Image (tube, rainbow, N blue to C red):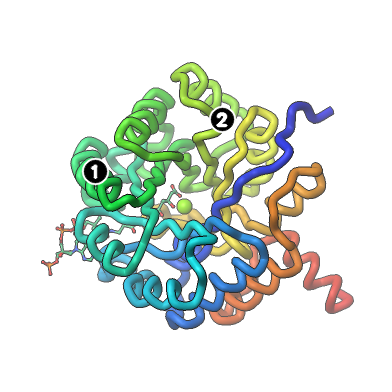
Amino acid sequence: MLSSLPKKIKIVEVGPRDGLQNEKTVLKTEDKIEFIAKLTEAGMVNIEATSFVRPEKIPQMGDANKLFELLVKRIPIDNYNFPCLVPNKIGLENAKKAGVREIAVFTATSDQFNMKNINASIDESFIRIEEVVKEALSYGMKVRGYVSTVFGCPYLGETSLLKMTEVTQRLFDLGAYEVSLGDTIGVGTPSQVLKVIDGLEKANIPLETVAMHFHDTRGMALANVLTSLELGITNFDCSAGGLGGCPYAKGAIGNLATEDLVYLCHSLGIETGIDLEKLMQASLFILDKLGRLSSSKFLIAKQGEKSGK
Ligand code: HMG
Ligand code: MG
């Protein structure tokens, strides 16, 4: 018997950023805006819109300025949170100019991953993060934090729980309102989720301030969600249609699909605020632009039902 499940959860849709940053096809800005608009029509209120990173590194996000400026014109942003990933002060200033009100800063539990991802060790990343967060808070922006490689690192292998709680606490101390813990390469299992949550509790980090960011590389994402739900986590990142991965983590094939998360939650009587039918329309729209199939089991099943196969 499942015990102590929450009544509702908060979802952060990361498809337009974490999803699209790892797709080969670089989409037109207008198509990305349409995707985000369709996600809002499905009931999504927290959508990671883009990242203000070096375009040479992530060409898929090279239109961040244009995208955000157009987004603000199309959607009444007072009603939504559109966090954008920012790696440094250059990114922050660009984000501010474009009208961004919430940023996400990111680091990892592994120096090796951080060096590949952002050309900085964990400690070096905090020098950048500290100046970015200070400045962002002085602009009145909200700040979300990410910790990558919580469940394992493609370069280091096993990562340290102690490092995870230390890095997470540092992000909170700087002023992050929420920290998302990334299973960047999708190696996590329910028993690891248990250990991570135990580590958070021992470090007195309130579970309601933490989000889980699972990748479904080994098919464990939903099992990890269920374990997290039972242990008191109520915030989850996911991407429509299961888009994405991470360009610096080979084999990180995709985020947990939003459809699969929503289907699971609704079956357990947990509110998400999402209309699954409209969500599928958003996913099918963007998958069509990318010319690829979904990795969402729910979406594949629904399409099969509709086509009578
Ligand atoms: P760097 O090469 O060390 O930068 O990049 P630099 O400070 O040496 O500057 C080099 C040049 O880049 C300069 O231009 C800068 O102006 C320019 P130049 O003088 O040579 O003409 N530059 C920039 N241009 C535009 N926007 C910027 C910017 N910064 C510098 N923001 C940096 C360091 C981190 C910026 C770079 O390596 C970068 O952008 N990397 C991309 C990182 C990234 O997006 N990774 C994927 C996201 S993380 C993720 O997916 C994990 C997550 O989902 C959670 C999980 O699953 O675990 C969050
Ligand atoms: Mg990710």
- Residue at image position (84%, 78%) is 307
- Is 25 situated above or below 167? below
Q: Residue furthest right?
A: 308
Which label is found at residue 164?
Answer: none
Mark 2 Cβ and ligand 1 under 8 Å apart = no
Q: Tell me the residue that label 2 is attached to.
A: 192
- Is 212 situated above or below 104? above
Asked which secondary structure carries label 2, the reply is helix
- Is 161 situated above or below 213? above
Type of amino acid under label 1: Lys
Residue 27, how many percent across, how many down?
A: 45, 79
Residue 279, how many percent across, how many down?
A: 68, 66
The residue closer to the viewer here, 100 or 21, is 100
Mark 1 Cβ and ligand 1 under 8 Å apart = no
The residue closer to the viewer here, 14 or 108, is 14
Q: Tell me the residue that label 1 is attached to.
A: 134
Q: Quadrant of the C terminus?
A: bottom right
181 left or right of 275 in image: left
> Would you say residue 299 is visible in this rendering?
yes
- Residue at image position (38%, 48%) is 142
Residue 29, how many percent across, how many down?
A: 43, 80
Type of amino acid under label 2: Gln
Q: Quadrant of the N terminus?
A: top right
Q: Looking at the image, tell me whether mark 1 or mark 2 is earlier in sequence order.
A: 1
> Would you say residue 153 is visible in this rendering?
no
